Image (cartoon, rainbow, N blue to C red):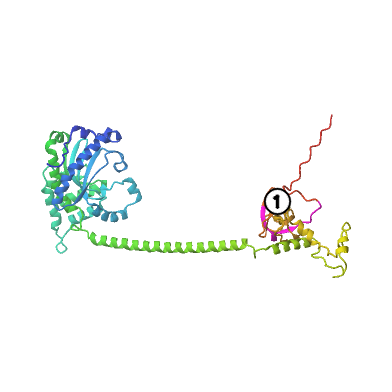
Amino acid sequence: MSHPSLHLTARDFDAYAAEKATSKAYSRPRLEVKQRALAWARGVVARLAELGISVDVHGSDEHPSIRNKHRADCQWVFFWRDQAAREELDRLLDRGRSISDVIDDPSPYTRHAFLALRLSEGEVQVCFAVHPDAKVDVDNLRARLSASDDATGEPTSLAAELTSALHALPEQFSFGAGGGDRVDCSAATPEAITEMLRRAADGQVPLWIGWSVPRETAVEHADILDEQLEDALVALAPIYRLVAWSRENDRIALDRKLEGIEQERARAHAELEAENERWRSEQARARERSMEEARARGDERVEASLPARRPTLATLFKAAGNAVAGRGEPRHTPKHAGEGGAPARRPQHAEAEPQAKGGAQPRPQAEPARRAQRGPAGEPDAARVTLEPAKGGVVEKGSRVRVRRGPFGDKIGVVSELDGRGGARVLLGLLSTRLELDDLELVAESRERPALSTSHRKPLAPTPRRAR
């Protein structure tokens, strides 16, 4: 043979001994067997393709895993329908499978009819197997065995075709349910096959048709065994063709059901896509509304933070003059003593010489107040530039105020800063907060104001102890 050979040895069989099956320490020799078996299987695939049977090849796990129930006591090489055909049937088989079944047996190999090579500690075998979980293939086989003529009620040639294929196998081949009692294929009848199917379903084991070679025989005849095993698998190909479901071997009218499943799947996919599109549109509209609301809130905050009109020097000093007038001083002084009624009163310490000599007019009383608002360099005092009237008078830096509303309602504090935009920073004990001037009212002040740095009293000095 031109392709690689198995060339099985005693060491290969020993790798699957019971005491080594659960240990990963022996995964390496099992992996070597698996690689040789998969290389040898390429020749089988080529010969099956010549017969018109297209199959894929897979090997079972050589290490303990969930798919072999954590026990690598044998090595399987599967020849089964290609991936497209498996996926087509899996959509149908998955509909009746519970999650517990998937967890209990995640292996996909029991769901399809297959040809296989199996190597264990005591034997090597080639077989055709169909497990009860391969419902499509089992139903197809039952339909073949029970087919009868509608007019006469006599069995059709479908069952006879299967039994003839079994009789044509070499005499070493047998069939049975799992590893139980097996019957020579030369004695197969439709009734016997039906009975074996019932036993397989009761025991949840596959219906098995094949040839087993003991370990001693396999090692002794290793030179010719590779070709013998390959020929045996090719001999089982007619059984696979008659039992495994395909569109050419459809005895249960599954083709129409699959078409219905595909149409239902396409309809469900279209509905899902339409729902996703509606959801995406709703999300886009919601984002637009949110952005518009955010922009509107931002515009409102900007408008609220800006003054009603840009202040000028005239309006600033006019506001300062009004503030002084609000404390009880006259807004202006008449130019002449006779205008507007009684003459203006002058301080006692002021001198009357300027008016007597040059006739100069006295300065208005608001001028000292206006001068007091300037700093040492003549610039306006920032703490008193934007004074705004509040309830009870004008709020300025250092004023004692009462909070009219909000979480600090009825609290009394001291104004430490004026921001010039209608707000003030108020010291409330250990807290300081920014409040609108409309939320403040002046408190009648005593002669001595508290210091601006804190509103707490200084601690009293401790009383000295009396001498005993």
Residue 182 placement: quadrant: top left
Q: How many marks?
A: 1
Q: Residue at x 11, y 48 (%)?
A: 167
- SS of the residue under disc 1: strand
Task: Quickly name the residue at label 1.
Answer: 428
Q: Residue at x 45, y 62 (%)?
A: 284
Q: Amino acid at mark 1?
A: Leu
Q: Seen from this angle, which residue lies furthest front?
A: 357
- Quadrant (top left/top right/bottom left/bottom right) for the C terminus: top right
- Quadrant (top left/top right/bottom left/bottom right) for the N terminus: top left
Within 10 Å of the Cα at label 1, are there few (<14), some (14-19), or many (20+) other Cα atoms? Answer: some
The answer to whether 345 is drawn above or below residue 397 in the figure is: below
| Residue 444 among magenta residues | yes
Q: Seen from this angle, which residue lies furthest top?
A: 468
Tell me where residue 234 appears, x and y as whole percent. Answer: 14, 47
Residue 451 in view (yes/no): yes
| Residue 77 among magenta residues | no
Q: Magenta segment range?
A: 433-447
Residue 252 placement: quadrant: bottom left
Q: Residue at x 24, y 54 (%)?
A: 84
- Pick whichever, 174 or 398, lies toward us: 398
